[in-house]
Image (cartoon, rainbow, N blue to C red):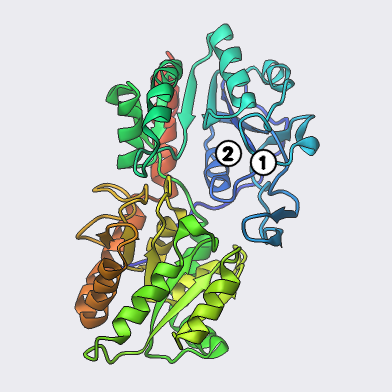
Amino acid sequence: MTAPEVVNKTSFEPGSTTKNKIRVAIVVSHPIQHHVHLYRALATVPELELKVFFASNIGAKSYFDRQMGVEIRWNTDLLEGYAHEFLPEADGIRETGLWAVDNPSISQALAAFKPQVLQLHGYAQLTLLRALVWCRWKRIPVLLWSDSSLVFQRGRIKSLIKRPAITLLMSQFDKVLTTGDNNEAYYRHYGVSSEKFHRCPFTVDEGSFSKAWNRRFEIREFLRDKYGIARDALVLLLVAKLVPWKRPRDLLDALLLLREQPSESREVVAFFAGDGALRSELETYASRENLPAIFGGFINVDLLPSIYAMSDVLVFPSDREPYGLSAREAICVGLPLLVSDQIGCVGKTDAARPNENAIVYPSGNVQSLANAISTVIADSNLRRRMGEQSLRIAEEMSVQHSVKGFLDAVRAVLDDGATIENYS
């Protein structure tokens, strides 16, 4: 099976306009590595004049990640290939919470651009709410794109208080760009009709993952030698911040249970790609119990595709995850998925599909995780079939499909939407 094709990046000159282009604005808290691939692809659509407004420059510059405890600077250009603008307050915003992201200038910026359609990434920030109110006042249609889901448990009282407010808020959006089954279930829960849905999968850097897939045998040998991993070992990859709700210790506990099963003769290694408050504790535990675990620390986006390609299976044990982008990435290099039932991307038409490319187990149930690992260790044909399904699913979720969903939504909210040619 061939790796997914990639949309070529196209440079965009701010200020270049065509008379009949449809002006589309996107408002988002900051440059997010997974979303810029959609922006670049949309910038290649001749009928659109796209502009992205950033509330802050978090991500565009180096910053200290408190959860991982490391300074992060992404080794990729997050601003190339599409028109964008940082709002005047951007330099002073250091967090992405509801009250922290507040840009009163958004109304003026949108008025200057004169969008015909606005897309918001999420709704739980003051800047996004300001933009929504401005569009309602100007009668400009608004699209919503988010990773919200109802998968993980929430407090009953909080849910009861939240439901009327969110239901009212959802009614203000003309169309919703959905990322998967659980995301759609979330919107239905808050009264959004399925007629408003347009599937727009989260995007990844398909070019980098395609290269990693095509060079997987070379990468596998090189990185396994680098980390001291046997060529025939089965590598279980966990890509996450090492914090409590990601449950990284579950993987080590599962390895401990597997060691008690003498029938499992193949060497199994856990590779942790990430850093965080639990790292020292996990390293101590793995050393004390003599568990085969490697802690790679924070791995930047330019190297991460190769780490996936070096591995055999992705393990995703979190107890709350609105979506789960590492699963979305892992399928691009054909990895089978072992995921907890609290991951948002689990679904019949999403990245982690039970009984196709994923084994889903109850979150926190280490024995079930160990059983799932034992299953994929023992059956190489199962791993192969799951990997092939992952590649097929990745093709179904390619950036072309994301752009099509976006354009379909734009068509649907504009009387002259038919002027946008079919995108394929």
SS of the residue under disc 2: helix
Residue 140 is tagged as: none
Q: Describe residue 69's horizontal placement relative to residue 334 as left or right.
A: right
Give x and y (percent) for residue 35.
54, 45
**Residue type of the residue flagged with mark 1:** Phe
Which disc, if any, is residue 43? 2
| Viewer-closest of 33 and 171 | 171
Label 1 sits on a secondary structure element that is loop
Quadrant showing the C terminus: top left
* Residue 54, horizontal then vertical, whole percent: 68, 35
Measuring from the top left, give residue 312's x and y in whole percent.
37, 76
Q: Is residue 200 visible to the viewer in this orientation of the structure? A: yes
**What separation in Å lies between label 1 and label 2 (alpha carbons)?**
7 Å
In the rendered image, the quadrant that contains the N terminus is bottom left
Residue 347 place in picture, x, y as percent: 27, 48
Judging by the rendered image, the residue that carries numbered circle 1 is 12
**Residue 411 visible in the current orientation:** no
Verify CB contact (< 8 Å) between mark 1 and mark 2. yes
